Image (cartoon, rainbow, N blue to C red):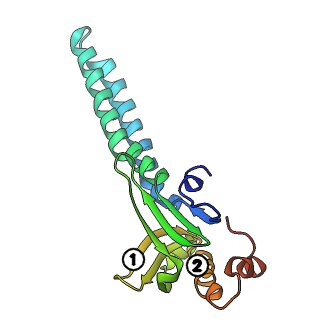
Amino acid sequence: MGYPEDVLAPEEQLILHRHPHWKMLFWPIVTLVVVTALAGFAGGFAARKAPEGTARTVLLIAILAIWLIIVVWRCVAPILSWKSTHFIITDRRLMVRQGVLTHSGIDIPMSRISSVQFRHGLFDRMLGTGTLIIESSSSEPLEYDDIPSVQQVHSLLYHQVFDVDHGDNGWDAHRREHGDYR
């Protein structure tokens, strides 16, 4: 898993590491297919109809440049953003890390979490995703969208926060109930 293990303290155990749900990649992939088809059509049209020589070459380079700009802006950037967003639960804290060029993150100690909720509509339930809402003792609720298997993550986090407080190891109890969700 690489990245999460680099941020763990000594003796801290990784329980869960997730990227946002793949549905975030749906529109970038659709954009890639559509823009590539349009660029191919425009390039073929330009190659057949444009006069020979420099004008055709300039037109084909312009089509390629526009295609490249759109692909980087609407496809590559969202994919890099998805890949660089990490939702991590350890036995001591919840961590969220994101960013490609500028990294940002938040750590919430398990002892500070006062409430764990989730929300997902019909479409999110069909895809197995949702929003995780975490209230800590010192701030407004934090909402994390597009968490895969949000109900399982909610249950895992709830057990980790509240069962550990009562002497049970929340992760082991969750594993017995639901299986390993790494």
Residue 50, which numbered label? Answer: none
What residue occupies the far right of the structure in this picture?
Answer: 176
80 relative to 50, above or below:
below
At a point 43% along the width and 84% down the height, the residue shown is 135
Res 36 → quadrant: top left
Q: Which residue is mark 2?
A: 157
Give left or right: position of 87 versus 42.
Answer: right
What residue occupies the far bottom of the structure in this picture?
Answer: 166
Give left or right: position of 102 versus 117.
Answer: left
* Residue 123 spot, x, y in % from top left: 50, 73
Q: Amino acid at mark 2?
A: Leu
* Residue 28 spot, x, y in % from top left: 42, 50
Q: Nearer the viewer, residue 103 or 32?
A: 103
What residue occupies the far left of the structure in this picture?
Answer: 55
Q: What kind of element bears circle 1? A: strand
Instruction: Point out the tag, 1 or 2, that comes first from the N-terminus.
Output: 1
**Marks 1 and 2, how far apart at CA:** 14 Å
At a point 40% along the width and 50% down the height, the residue shown is 78
At a point 62% along the width and 65% down the height, the residue shown is 12
The residue carrying pointer 2 sits among few (fewer than 14), some (14 to 19) or many (20 or more) residues within 10 Å by Cα, namely many
Q: Nearer the viewer, residue 172 or 10?
A: 10
The residue carrying pointer 1 sits among few (fewer than 14), some (14 to 19) or many (20 or more) residues within 10 Å by Cα, namely few
What residue occupies the far top of the structure in this picture?
Answer: 53
Q: Quadrant of the C terminus?
A: bottom right
Q: Which residue is mark 1?
A: 142
Give left or right: position of 165 versus 114.
Answer: right
* Residue 39 spot, x, y in % from top left: 35, 33
* Residue 138 spot, x, y in % from top left: 36, 83
Q: What kind of element bears circle 2? A: helix
Q: Amino acid at mark 1?
A: Leu
At a point 25% along the width and 25% down the height, the residue shown is 62
80 relative to 8, above or below:
above
